[in-house]
Amino acid sequence: MKRITFWLAAVATVAGVIAFTARASRHADEEASPIYGVKIPAGYRDWQLIAVKQLHFAGMGEQLRAQVGNDIAIKAFEEGTLPFPDGAIIAAIHWTRVPSEDNNKVLDGPFPGTQSFVIGSRVNVQFMVKDSKKYAATGGWGFADFTGEKPGDRALHETCFPCHGPAKDHDYVFTHYAP
Amino acid sequence: MKRITFWLAAVATVAGVIAFTARASRHADEEASPIYGVKIPAGYRDWQLIAVKQLHFAGMGEQLRAQVGNDIAIKAFEEGTLPFPDGAIIAAIHWTRVPSEDNNKVLDGPFPGTQSFVIGSRVNVQFMVKDSKKYAATGGWGFADFTGEKPGDRALHETCFPCHGPAKDHDYVFTHYAP
């Protein structure tokens, strides 16, 4: 019994060391977006909500999206500050959209024919990082698009700034703060 | 000039006092939901994001929705704690959904036929407040549904708990934490 306990403890220790090493090395290997060198900001999933969107890609499925911001970005949104101050970061989280049978069963009673859609899985996440000096050539914004922890390629990131061009009057940010 | 400055200061002071009084009295008059006595929790719009939903009400329009939670609720979601601990509060913010011509113009280039939908205006907000003793008869949850700062009537609030019944295995909460 003692021997089993010892081996269990040994295995647990080794597993712990491997897990720790994996986490540490993952952190060190963390990739940055091409062109802009933007890494995934720590803790962004816990940032405050800016707004929500839905996207219908013709023939390519449906997405639900949420935009969240760090404290500097949220303050700027709330106070209507334009351009956004340096240090502002906006994250756009994109998920697949799937029908919710559970919700539909419940809602169909009071609201016949109602269809409820919820989040399926994560597709990608995009970041806009404000640094008016570093990113002066692209409206003061650095861009990044990650699938999992892997940034998209250079060609993808070359589309970011031109795509945001039409929103120039709102400092290149499409999203408005939801009431 | 001195006289003008004095009057401007006086007007500003009076305006400040009126604004403060209005805020204070609004706070005192704040209404609570029938049955449960739940008031709008301070600062809930700044809580962390749980998930996003879309609802198609047959013949009654479209909604985009977001669920946010206070720190106790978010911790429980992240750690998979069930039942939710006392003090957990979940807010579901419901907005109308409108097409975004601005987004469509941009997206139609790389993704022809894409349709983007954004938030129109606030419809209502719902709260679930966990207090296993106070709300023992309704699964430990107190419910509230507000349009603006006005709670819905008693008949509406009588539907909350039965409606959440099918989610009993998930402590009466339909929403799952988005990845």
Image (cartoon, coloured by chain):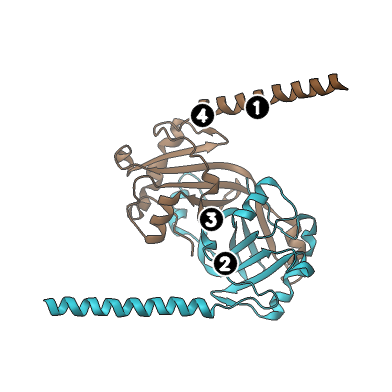
Chain colours: A brown, B cyan
* Residue corresponding to mark 1: A19
Q: Residues within 10 Å of mark 3 (few under 14, many from 20)?
A: many
Tell me the residue that label 4 is attached to.
A30
Q: CA distance from mark 3 to mark 1?
A: 36 Å
Residue B132 vertical placement versus B50 (above, below): below
Q: Is there one chain holding both mark 4 and mark 1?
A: yes
Q: How dense is the environment of label 1, judged by Cα within 10 Å: few (below 14), some, or many (20 and up)?
A: few
Secondary structure under the numbered disc 2 in the rendered image: loop
Mark 4, residues whose alpha carbon is within 10 Å: few (<14), some, or many (≥20)? few
Which residue bears the numbered disc 3? A53
Q: Amino acid at mark 3?
A: Lys
Q: Is B160 placed above or below A170 here?
A: below
Going 49% across and 61% down the picture, which residue do you hit? A178
Q: Which residue is mark 2?
A: B41
Screen quadrant of the N terminus of chain A: top right
- Say which residue appears at 65% left-offset and 47% top-offset: B78
Q: Quadrant of residue A10?
A: top right
Q: How many marks?
A: 4
